[in-house]
Image (cartoon, rainbow, N blue to C red):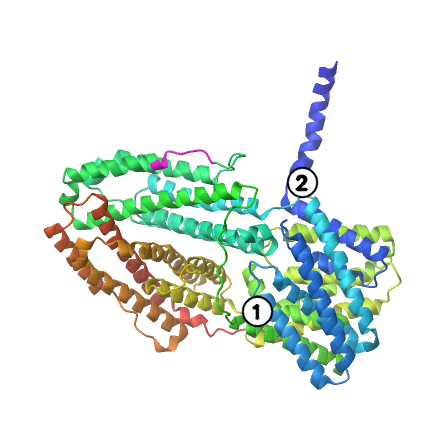
Amino acid sequence: MNAIAQAGRFPFAQEWSWPIRNLLNDVRVRYGIKLGLAGLLALFLTQILRLPDDAWAILTVFVMMLSQYVGSAAVKAITRVLGTIAGAIVGVWLVGNYTSTPMIFLPVLFVVIAFATYKFGQIGPRQAPYAYFVLGVTTLVIATDGIAAPEKAWQLGLYRPEEIVVGIVSALLVSSILWPRYARAEFITSARDALRSVEALLSAQTQDDARGADASAALDKIRQTFAARLGALTNLRQAGARESTLFSARLPQYDAYLVSLTSLFDAALYLAEQPLPDAPIVDRLRKELKQISRAIVEEIRIVSGPGPGGEQLPASSLNAAFADLEQKIAEVREQGFLVEEPMTIGVTFASHTAALRLLRDELNTLRAIRERLLVNREVPGPEPHRKHALKIDWPWIKIGMKGGLAAVIAITLLKWIHPPGAAAIPLMAWLQAINGRAFLRAGGSGDRRAFQNAFLGCLVFTACTVALLALAPLLASYLTMNLVLFFVLFAFGFATAKVSGITFGMQLGFLIVSAFVGLNLQQPVSSQAIIDTFVGLGIGLFVGATVGRLLWPVLPQMVLREDLLAVLADLKALLSEQENREAIPTQLTLRSIEAYQAVRQIPLLGPSHEERERLYSLITEVQALVPRVRRLITLQDDLPQPCEPFLRLPLQRLKSESMELLDAFADRLRTPSRRRDLPAMDGAFAGIDDALRQIRDRRPLASYPVNVPLLMLDIVGRYQAVAHALDKIRRLVANSQIERYWGDYAL
């Protein structure tokens, strides 16, 4: 009877439980529920504690819930509370002493807001910048409210920290207890997608060795897919570094993973673009090369797989297969096959085997990092962050000045013409003026469409005003108010759960919901108060858009140029062997990814599809150049001594001409009107070919083990690969006319 009952109940239970379970497994649904519950909890606590302004608790919930990862709850709470208290002290001091003397009040307010914006812009693997942001918000709010009623400044200074603490507590309780997210686990999951691009690249190479238009298009598609996945991984790295103390403590491990992953993809791309020619030596090694290919794919699947519950990943045959290949190469060399092959085939073969060796080394590195990241306890002895000399971040100096100016203009308007919705204008203006770079990194257009976005935002405010005027009688009920608030927050969380960063639409959502809560429709509210609130938001939106767009605007084409110049400077620093080069590979990776994202937002002239593809190709070539230069630097000092009389000068010439070409690229980006010719490197290539012929004729490495001549050929191949990549970039720069977009300030 029991078995029959179970059999009868099972289909019904399966029918109802699985859809609900699948629904709750969606991260968007989970985030929407968490945001809705945190907002309701904050609203409930503010009413229980009889705090005057619910909106600030809700706004704090929004800002806190952007940090979706567990690991730094205490640090974030402390920094936010300290920032709020400091902002309250500064705001009360300003309002209490200088409201009646604008010549002091406005300059001091400008300096405070500009400094808070600048420090917030330096956000990185630390939590302190959040305190500066909250300091700026609190100071601006108290200054705004204190203009109308200076005698209430102390009351505002006491209430604001309490309301913000309520929002902090609500957000931390919900995010830590209900479906907590861990940055480490999501980083590993996202890395699997990027590794699958490497597997797809190797599979495309083995399935279709023919070089044609279709194969080239397939490679370009894989490169763009990998760039997009690497961009998502980089955004996750930045979010985890900001939001999780544990993640930030292991940041060198994650940076090493990104650099190694980029190098791994470049090695696979090199194999796909430079296939082995049909030659007797290749035929002799066909079996071992196929074993290597299978072992590499097997290792990629292991490293990208979910992994066991323990600390060790399953073993693979990669190292054994590579040992068999090296042994067979030594046998082939003893039989004279290497000497009999043309020098060009020898260089290609050595570069191919070196790329395979690099794949093996990087996969072993990724395996080691992955195993360390699988450990739940703290990794012993993480690399400390190196201390660098104090460096002024000039782009954020400009953004800080924009933020301070927007706040001062908004406050001046309040004292001058007394516009409606005064309480919303300064905060809206400040946020709109400073978030251009954040909008761009989250996939927006920065300040390029500031006025169009401001107009669209006003249309949204109008729709919200009409909706609230119609629904105000219904929202007088406490139950209805809470249900509407929950569903609004749920919809906002569902729509933004997978967005990395802050978009313009998210910023509007923050302030609309905060205004909705601040109106407190459970009590009688006049229609004029509702209209004034959204009119104030619209005025602040246009003030911030005007300042952000007309004063040092953040435009995607300018960000692209800035990133390209930084990448070229770092590449030159690597080639010239400057000191303090440890952080350059990570900087190069992050800069090249941001440049790739900026290309999507550049307004193009003429046949935009072809031009955009050309710009994408330029960025991907620059991105591929990063690991090649890094690999070259590690090998250049290993040139066998017997070959130095033949190769030292030709390689030095090739290196010098590569640096000259980098300088020419930078000059072309800085001063497009000069139209400097980009030098070719045909003479350097000819010199290397002549040196290789002399080495072949004189055979100075005949008595050395096989790995020595292969290393020599690999070094030559690496120099040539860097030079060929630069030459390809030279042609793309010459054909793309990229300088046409630098001066495009169209509104």
Establish if 135 lies above or below 638.
Answer: below
Question: Which kind of residue does numbered mark 2 sit on?
Answer: Leu
Q: Secondary structure at mark 1?
A: loop
Residue that lies at the very extreme toward the top in this rendered image: 1
Residue under label 1, please give it.
447
Question: Which kind of residue does numbered mark 1 sit on?
Answer: Asp
Picture disc at residue 24: 2
Establish if 486 lies above or below 435.
Answer: above
The boundaries of the magenta stretch are 313-319
Q: Is residue 717 left or right of residue 696?
A: right
**Residue 706 in picture, x, y percent from top left:** 21, 43
In the rendered image, which quarter is residue 657 located in? bottom left
Say whether residue 425 is visible. no
**Residue 558 in picture, x, y percent from top left:** 48, 70
N-terminal of the two: label 1 or label 2? Answer: 2
Going 53% across and 53% down the picture, which residue do you hit? 237
**Residue 51 in picture, x, y percent from top left:** 83, 61
Say whether residue 234 is visible. yes
Going 33% across and 63% down the picture, which residue do you hit? 575
3D distance between C-alphas at marks 1 and 2: 37 Å
Q: Is residue 318 magenta?
A: yes
Picture disc at residue 611: none
Establish if 643 lies above or below 452.
Answer: above
Q: Quadrant of the C terminus?
A: bottom right
Residue that lies at the very extreme toward the left in this rendered image: 697
Q: Secondary structure at mark 2?
A: helix
